[in-house]
Image (spheres, grey):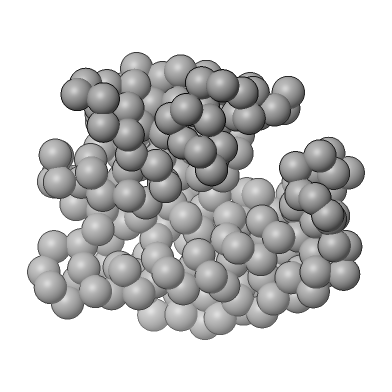
Amino acid sequence: MKLYDGGGAPNPRRVRIFLAEKGVEVARIPVDMGVLEHRGETVTRLNPLQRLPILELDDGTILTESVAICRYFEERQPDPPLFGTSALDRALVEMWQRRVEFGLFMPVSAAFRHLHPAMKEWEVPQVPEWGEVNKPRAAEFLHLLNRELATRRFIAGDHFTIADITCLVSIQFMKPARIDMPEGLPHLQRWFDVIAARPSADA
């Protein structure tokens, strides 16, 4: 089993943090996205979309998309559960995972891809107006999260889940996306300090 890894990019980080929380070791193949290595022959053969991460199983099966890869490892090693346990719990995790993806992860990514000079060769064409539109969308969602976190420890409830991983990666990616953290979000800050201090956050 091999994991084709894209370094500091948000989606590869989500998988690495997830694996660290599970205590799962997987052989990693580094791919230098800075020199567009993900557009080379090897990655294109494995994933025609030229996106990372990519998990290649021992039988040659290829899995892409970060959450799909995480779900695979959740089934292989259920403990600790990062997608929930009961039917309701799993639904709540899925709900918040999607909310964070649509409300924060995607706006931050859009701002980065359409505004950062280093992305000119990646995002063709760059649409700076679209990048700017997404900055306040991310900030608005952070205010919503702050209100939600006034009543619980983690994004989806009382336990750490993949929704927390996606949120952590999104917030940390705000810096290269040049989105400032809004002031006056004490509950979100409390959550962030706890999550960023977990050993997995360095994965």
Q: Work out whether 124 lies above or below 23.
A: below
Closer to the camera, 69 or 149?
69
Q: In this view, does 102 lie to the left or right of 134?
A: left
How far from the left and from the top, in percent, is residue 153? 37, 67
Q: Which residue is drawn at 66% across and 56% down?
A: 109
Q: Which residue is drawn at 76% across and 60% down?
A: 111
Q: In this view, does 2 lie to the left or right of 57?
A: right
- Residue 177 in view (yes/no): no
76 lies left or right of 44 = left
* x 85%, y 44%: residue: 120
Residue 138's place in the image compared with 52, above or below, is below
Residue for point 46% across, 80% down: 148
Is the N terminus in the top left, top right, bottom left or bottom right quadrant?
Answer: top left
Would you identify the image quadrant in which residue 125 lies? bottom right
**Where residue 129 sits in the image (x, y, percent)?**
87, 69
Q: How far across and down, in percent of the image, does residue 3 sit?
A: 38, 26
